[in-house]
Image (tube, grey):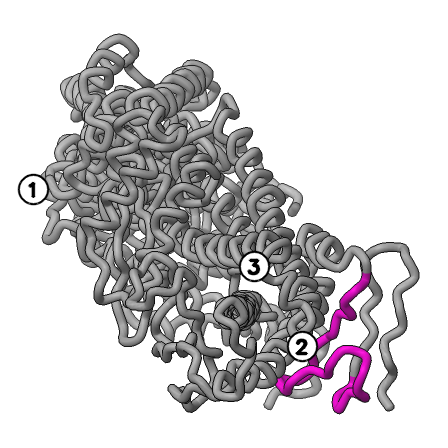
Amino acid sequence: MATYNKERVEHALNELLVRILPEDPNDEDEVANERFDEAFEYAIEELETAGDPSVVPDINHVASLIDKRVSRDVNGAQKSARFHNLLSRLISQPVLNQKWRMLHFLNQLSELPQAEHAETRDAARMPITPTKHAHTNPLPTGSPAFKDAFSRPGLSHIPVNDGSPKPSPRPAPAEPADKRRDRRATDASKEQSAEAAPPEPTYLLLGPSEPALLRDLPFTLQGISSTNLIFPSSTALKLPPTLPVPLISLLHTLAEPSLLYRGLSDFVESTEGGLVGQSFRSALGMELRSYLGLVATLEGQIKRALQQLDESQTHHGLGKAGVTLKRCVIWTREATMGLRLMSLMVEESKTKKGGELISLIHSFSLSHGDPYVGAFAERLLAHVTRPFYDMLRQWIYDGELADPFGEFFVSEQSEAEIFEANNGKEGKGGATSVWEDKYKLSTNMIPTIITEDFARKVFLIGKSLNFIRYGCGDAAWVDTYSRSASKELRYGDTANLEQSIGDAYKTTMARLIDLMEKKFHLFEHLQALKSYLLLGSGDFIAVLMESLSSTLDRPANTQYRHTLTAQLEHAVRNSNAQFDSPDVLRRLDSRMLELSHGEIGWDVFTLEYKIDAPVDVIVTTFGSKQYLKVFNFLWRVKRVEFALSSTWRRCMTGARGVLGTVSDVFGSDWKKARCAISEMIHFVNQLQYYILFEVIESSWNELQSSLRKPESTLDDLITAHARYLTNITRKGLLGSSGADFTGQLHELLKTMLGFREAVDGLYGCSVAEFTRRQEVAAKIETRTAAGRWGVEEKDAESASPDPFSSTGKAKGKHRSTPSATSSPFPPALMPLNLPNNPLSSSNQLDILPALRKRLASLLTDFRARVNVLLGDLAHQPDVDMRWLAMVMNFNDVYQPVRRRRKAAPGTKGKDAGREREKETPAPQTAPGTAAAAKG
Amino acid sequence: PSPPASSQDVKRKAAREVIDILHEIATLLNTHLDRQQLSYCVSLIENGANPEALANVIRKLRSEYDASSGEGEAE
């Protein structure tokens, strides 16, 4: 700081003033002197009162000030360069002490335009022109010192105008900070001056003013185009291009709810989609309405604020009125979040409907972290799920599906779908179709508000109700039930809902089972099936067999249905079956299967039990077929048993009488035959016992227990019955598992029948022999009585009545056909496999060897087969079958063979087997006999 | 071209040069000061006058006398 050297100053000042003050030649000296003195006084005073200069005493700073000033001028760059040049030269000079003061002085004196100092400005533009001139400053606080005190050092000397159109301190008025209220006026003035600063030539338009935008805002927020903010399309908003950037950013933020609202209102107006979709739309509509309420409040506020606008103040005093764009942004923020969420939901819901839609909204309320989102989704859910719950209610209590848009998770299947579902086969007919196929559960449509278990229960309930109504014809009950029990279901009431569903479930299922049992006599029918088709009622079957046996021996094409039915009636009347209910007896019928050539009656006969709806849901058509299969098998076994036992009877009774007399010839044969027959009878008996008691009865018990379970549903019944039948077929050696039991058994049975016929042939032989002997004896007697020789030669050549008549293989052995012979004994059959049927009157003793051979071969065949069967049985996983093997072979008379190849199995013991025989230990703990090892 | 410069000469020379420079700057800045006035201003300021006050004075006087006499200043 230079010292104030008064003397020198005065002197210099004197000189200066002389030169400055213009000389007026006209003036007198005195006046001039006076003026001079005046000026001098003033100057001295001024100089003495002035304090320190207000500029930072830094030459660079001052230089930069000057530089800026210079570059403002016309040839700015040039002049600036020159100035820099001069400056550098000046600085290099050692002369002046404080160059900066000089420069500062020059700066001050400069008449170049400066940014802030608007002396040359059009005064009409802005009310305030803060200048260095104290007297032109209207603001009370507008003195340069004060002003400068607020500005950053040097701010007032720096042109604020840096080319951008935005008045930067503009957001300041909108700040709600209270502590700045008192300075608001100053700030406003300062900023206004700042605003006044930008030289007009480059930025005249500031776009629509904030009040204008505020006026348009309520319309914009509703998606309506306004003067300044236009919606060229439904997804775009056009902002005026001349707005300053902060305004643009605010408007961007405000544009978001507007566009979202537009999109959402379009969506809400649309009417596609199912019931759930429509309720979704209405729920969204409600939310949008509350949004509109917010917009209305906003509009009210804006209107009030705009009325209070004061033209005289900055921004028309908008800041004071309290409503600005920024405020609106804050007010709409929460609503924007809601709108965002809604539009997200709408987007995702485009592909979904019904249960999926509900799951979508539910997922928002469940797993979203933001509590706002969760609450919002819950609100929506209560609304959206209403049609769903209506459908649910109707399904549960009425069994009716009221789902026009296919939104429920239970859907009705059309014919085509059922067809497809059965892989192109025909659907199961009758009531089964109603139960199984009519409705289907689509898991992806189950909304997440109910669990899958629950959904299954619901499905069952509805299905059962529907079934009761249509399948069982009990619509009345359904109606009363629905009237009494139906209550409204709601979202959010989970405990209640579960309770209702549980109750409905129990009631419906109980009712269904009850109906099945009482009205349709399900259990009776099952019992009847068992006793008739599965040969459960022995007496009936025995009578039937006896009466039918003679008929069935004849060829199939001679059977008549009415005879069969008559026999059936006869059997029914003569057994306990007559005490069954007439309904049951009505369904029992005899039938003939399809004929093919060469069959005898035994092959085509079958009983039948008619089942109709709705019981055939449980006893399906497939089940009926299985019953028939089992019946067929059992009937055959029974037949063999019957045949064998009747032969046995004859043998036994005959042994005391006729056969005893011929035992010299036939004795050993008969012994062998008796052994063989007893063996076979044993086998058949064991087999029958096994099937009837071990298999059928035990499965029946299982079935009963599962049927009578308290919580069983119709599905349970169906599965239990199916299992029952599979058990029977599998264990009853009818299943098509590895070893072909059925085939083996059939072969065995055939063998036995053949043997029996052979035995019959033997019997006939014996009888014929006996007869012959008797005749001879009689002849001898008569002759002896007549006094002649008893036996003559020609007797030996006489032809005895041919006891053999050839019969075709097709003829079954029978007793009731009246024969033409007079002999009280029916003609015995010829052995079956003699290719030639000699009608010659050869002695029966000639037949005998062939007969013997046949008997022997049949016996060995039988035994071999039994071995194979036993071997297979012993290796079955099922314990019952192994038991059968054990019981058949209880005295280890057979050696079970594990069949390796299809070749004929080795014989028993005697011959060295051509094949390997593997030892299969008997299931008993008795030491198994070692089979002959492969030689 | 002058004889071996004494410090005075150097000083004078320097002073003259400074004045020149300042005059140029003053011209750039449109201050309407001529050399004489400028030199006196320099001396004033060097002697401790407040440059802003001085500038004010000059301006005031100018405006006064401009307004009253309507004559332009001397150069």
| Tags 1 and 2 on a common chain | yes
- Is there one chain holding both mark 1 and mark 3? yes
Identify the mark nearer the N-term, 1 or 3. Answer: 1
The segment highlighted magenta reads: A892-916
Spot occupied by residue A553 in the image (x, y as percentages of width and height): 35, 62
Q: Looking at the picture, which amino acid does disc 2 mark?
A: Thr
Q: Chain of mark 1?
A: A
Mark 3: which secondary structure?
loop
Disc 1/disc 2 C-alpha distance (Å): 113 Å
Magenta stretch holds residue A343 = no
User: In the image, are marks 3 and 2 on the same chain?
Assistant: yes
Disc 3: which residue? A733
Secondary element under disc 1, as helix, strand or loop, is loop
Q: Quadrant of residue A261?
A: top left
The residue wearing badge 1 is: A227
Q: Chain of mark 3?
A: A
Q: Left or right: where does residue A900 sit relative to residue A590?
A: right
- Front in this rendered view, residue A175 or A279: A279
Main secondary structure along the magenta-highlighted residues: loop
Q: Which residue is mark 2?
A: A860
> Mark 1 is on which residue type?
Thr
Counting from the top left corner in percent of width and height, residue A398 is at 23, 23
> At 52% across and 72% down in the image, what residue appears?
A787
Q: Residue at the location (26% across, 28% down)?
A: A583
State how far apart marks 1 and 3 are (Cα): 92 Å
In the displayed structure, does residue A852 sit left or right of residue A138? Answer: right
Q: Earlier in the sequence, mark 1 or mark 2?
A: 1
Q: Tell me the kind of residue under disc 3.
A: Leu
Secondary structure under the numbered disc 2 in the rendered image? helix
Toward the top, the furthest residue is: A484
Quadrant assignment for the C terminus of chain A: bottom right
Q: Is residue A161 above or below residue A555?
A: above
